[in-house]
């Protein structure tokens, strides 16, 4: 059995040894699951993001309380994101040693944590609007580019990556002004786990508190 020190070293080595492009694509899409469905089209992927940004626009311009908005963002995240794949990717190599219970509880805690985190980010768009601009198929997923227009600011790009590897079209990554959600969350979760000496249950408890 590996020592805890070796497990921490394995995590750090895995992160350092892979390039950003490899992490972004292979890390998310190599997770076991249904094969890439040939039936998914660029237009279907675009329509998914159309619906997604439509709901985000409704929330950010609702005029309701911050707490209400954050609850709505969690519902949207659960509806449109491939949460199990994102959570497993964020946990990295440690997902292999996690029990089914730990993965279930981590995924649930991670969903609330990340949806509220990005809910705060999208809440900054109040008074603005996200518009879908174009979509294209890459090797194993679709890239949908949107433009966010805010009052008094230059428009900026938000990009969604969509796949049907889970069995239905869902987004598995977001780039906001060039910041890669998958990479950012993996680095943060790995750092949190390192500080807890690899204790997954402690990580789950603290994610619940942070959310």
Image: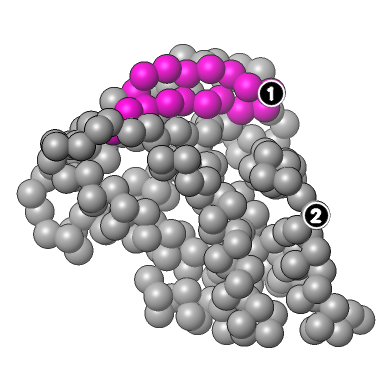
Does residue 205 lie above or below 142 as drawn? below
Residue 47 position, x and y percent, is 39, 22
**Which residue corresponds to the image point at 29% horizontal and 48% vertical from the top-left?**
122
**Foreground label between 2 and 1:** 2
Does the segment drawn in magenta span residue 141? yes
Farthest right residue in view: 1
**Which residue corresponds to the image point at 53% horizontal and 32% vertical from the top-left?**
162
Tell me the magenta residue range.
132-148
Residue 56 position, x and y percent, is 27, 40
Q: Mark 2 points at which residue?
A: 17
Q: How many discs appear?
A: 2
- In the displayed structure, does residue 161 sit left or right of residue 146? right
**Which residue corresponds to the image point at 41% horizontal and 42% vertical from the top-left?**
176
- In the displayed structure, does residue 104 sit left or right of residue 197? left
Q: Mark 1 points at which residue?
A: 139
Does residue 56 lie above or below 44 as drawn? below
Q: Is mark 1 on a helix, strand or loop?
A: loop
Residue 43 seen:
yes
Which class describes the residues within 10 Å of circle 1: few (<14), some (14-19), or many (20+)? few
**Which residue corresponds to the image point at 47% horizontal and 18% vertical from the top-left?**
135
Does residue 39 lie above or below 149 as drawn? above
Give the CA distance from mark 2 to mark 1: 22 Å
Does the segment drawn in magenta span residue 192? no
Q: Is the magenta stretch mostly helix, strand or loop?
A: strand
- In the displayed structure, does residue 120 sit left or right of residue 25? left
Image quadrant where one finds the N terminus? bottom right
């Amino acid at each position: 059995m590996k020592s805890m020190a070796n497990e921490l070293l394995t995590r750090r080595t895995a992160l350092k040894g892979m390039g950003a492009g490899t992490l972004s694509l292979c890390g998310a899409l190599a997770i076991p699951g249904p094969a890439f469905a040939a039936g998914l089209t660029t237009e279907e992927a675009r329509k998914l993001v159309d619906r997604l940004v439509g709901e985000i626009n409704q929330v950010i311009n609702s005029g309701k309380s911050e707490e209400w908005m954050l609850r709505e963002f969690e519902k949207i995240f659960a509806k449109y994101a491939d949460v199990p794949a994102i959570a497993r990717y964020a946990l990295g190599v440690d997902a292999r040693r996690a029990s089914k219970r730990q993965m279930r509880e981590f995924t649930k805690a991670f969903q609330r944590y990340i949806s509220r985190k990005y809910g705060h980010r999208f809440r900054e768009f109040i008074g603005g609007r996200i518009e879908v601009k174009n979509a294209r198929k890459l090797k194993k997923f679709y890239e949908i580019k949107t433009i966010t227009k805010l009052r008094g600011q230059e428009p900026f790009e938000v990009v969604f990556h969509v796949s049907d590897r889970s069995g239905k079209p869902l987004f598995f990554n977001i780039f906001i002004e060039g910041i890669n959600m998958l990479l950012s969350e993996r680095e943060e979760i790995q750092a949190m786990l390192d500080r807890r000496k690899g204790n997954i249950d402690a990580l789950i408890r603290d994610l619940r508190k942070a959310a």
